[in-house]
């Protein structure tokens, strides 16, 4: 503490009266104080440079980490998009299959319902107006069929081109 007071006193005297007015001991103290200030300034400058270098190194490392994270995020984004697309495709396929099955069921149900209602209506019409719809009392037959009275002998299917084979005796 007394050293600091002496140094402050020597500086004030050198400022006021000049360095030539100082004795040898005070000049030595002034040089020592200036040297110490220079050492402190150099040490501070070195520390600042070291901190700046450390900050630059940290910045470079952080930039590399950020770039790596961005790359990983892009990759994960692509993976997620692919997974979502695949899931949406599966869901849409299942939905389409379900909708098609539902449509087939509805068509089958509607066809059955329409046929039932049509049958009921035809039955009601038959009961209300029995003569309005002529029904044949005969059995069902195809349009190409002939009446029973017209049936003739059928040709032999084993004869070639409908020719009649004559029996001849061979002895």
Image (spheres, rainbow, N blue to C red):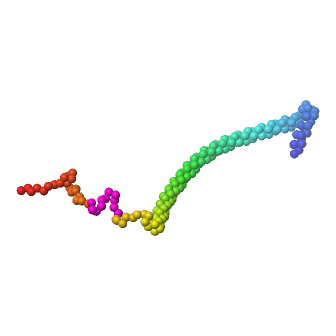
Query: Which sits in the foreground, 61 or 99?
Result: 99
What secondary structure prevails in the magenta region?
loop
Direction top: furthest residue: 20
Image location of residue 63, percent across then percent down: 66, 42
**Highlighted range, magenta:** 140-150
Write the residue at 36% across / 66% down. Answer: 137
Please determine whether, in this image, residue 114 is positioned above or below residue 50: below
Quadrant, the C terminus? bottom left
Image location of residue 95, percent across then percent down: 53, 56
Q: Is residue 38 visible?
A: yes
Question: Which quadrant would residue 33 be assigned to in this image?
Answer: top right
Asked whether 58 falls inside the magenta stretch, the response is: no
Please determine whether, in this image, residue 4 is positioned above or below residue 124: above
Query: Which sits in the foreground, 115 or 84?
Result: 115
Query: Which sits in the foreground, 11 or 26?
Result: 11
Write the residue at 35% across / 63% down. Answer: 140
Image location of residue 11, percent across then percent down: 89, 37
Left or right of 161 in this view: 35: right
Q: Is residue 50 visible?
A: no
Quadrant, the N terminus? top right
Query: Which sits in the foreground, 9 or 110?
Result: 110
Direction right: furthest residue: 17
Direction bottom: furthest residue: 127
């Amino acid at each position: 503490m007394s050293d600091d007071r002496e140094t402050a006193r020597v500086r004030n005297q050198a400022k006021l009266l000049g360095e030539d007015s100082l004795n040898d001991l005070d000049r030595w103290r002034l040089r020592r104080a200036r040297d110490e200030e220079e050492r402190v300034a150099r040490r501070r400058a070195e520390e600042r440079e070291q901190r700046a270098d450390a900050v630059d190194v940290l910045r470079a490392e952080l930039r590399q980490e950020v770039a790596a994270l961005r790359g990983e995020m892009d990759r994960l984004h692509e993976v997620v998009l692919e997974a979502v697309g695949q899931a949406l495709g599966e869901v849409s396929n299942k939905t389409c299959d379900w909708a098609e099955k539902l449509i087939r069921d509805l068509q089958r149900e509607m066809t059955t319902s329409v046929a039932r209602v049509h049958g009921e209506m035809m039955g009601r019409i038959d009961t209300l107006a029995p003569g309005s719809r002529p029904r044949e009392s005969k059995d069902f037959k195809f349009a190409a069929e002939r009446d029973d009275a017209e049936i003739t002998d059928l040709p032999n299917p084993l004869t070639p081109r409908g020719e009649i084979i004559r029996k001849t005796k061979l002895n």
